[in-house]
Image (cartoon, helix red, strand yellow):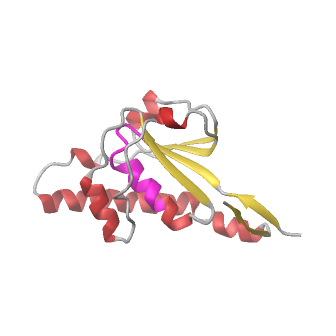
Amino acid sequence: MKQVIEKKRVLFICTHNSSRSQMAEGLLNDLYGNYCEAYSAGTAPSNVNPYAIKVMKEIGIDISNYRSKSIKEFRNMKFDYVVTVCDHAKETCPFFLGANNYIHSGFRDPSEFKGKEDDIIAEFRHVRGEIKEWIEKTFGDFDERVKYEGYEGVAT
């Protein structure tokens, strides 16, 4: 008999919840939304970076309605994975109550890039690509594991 599984909850954390964690949330929900439910937060939230919104829109993912959130908003939630995507967040938030697994993968902060707009956008695209590649490597076989283990679907 096939079982129905719960979606895996994933929280991406970075310092300002403005670029890297926002792009990671959008990518995971787009790529593996049938099996995962992604959220993002910051240790010192600010605003979603307009360049992050722009480069995500280029690949068909709309994060224009996302907002920067504090990790405090998620303190009462349980997560299968908590992922820090910057070194500062890893240092300032080394432990998150309610997490089953901790993962760290540091990515350069695209909001610190300076120069012409075309150069800044190119750097945002590069970081977006790095995050996408990492997500595919880290979570990409989840749908295959679900099929292999004989699960029927995912409860929402």
Residue 79 location (% of width, % of height) = 62, 43
Please indicate whether residue 109 sits to the left or right of residue 25 in the image: left
Residue at horizontal 50%, vertical 60%?
28
Q: Quick check: is 132 in the magenta stretch?
A: no
Quarter location, residue 5: bottom right
- Determine the residue located farthest toward the front in the rendered image: 65
Left or right: where 126 falls relative to 144: left
Q: Position of residue 118 (x, y in %)?
A: 15, 63
Image quadrant where one finds the N terminus: bottom right
The residue positioned farthest toward the right in the image shown? 1
Closer-to-camera residue (94/50) = 50
Residue sticking out furthest to the left: 116
Give x and y (percent) for residue 74.
54, 37
Instruction: Name the residue: 64% across, 63% down.
Output: 142
In the image, the segment drawn in magenta is 14-27
The residue at 55%/30% (across/down) is 95
- Does residue 118 sit above or below 93 in this rendering? below
Q: Quadrant of the C terminus?
A: bottom right
Residue at x 39%, y 66% (from the top left corner): 61
Question: Is 15 contained in the magenta span?
Answer: yes
In screen coordinates, is 21 left or right of 9?
left
Rendering quarter of residue 35: bottom right
At which x and y percent is residue 25?
46, 54
Q: Which of 130 and 80 is in front in this view?
A: 80
Pick the front one: 36 or 134: 36
The number of callouts visible is 0
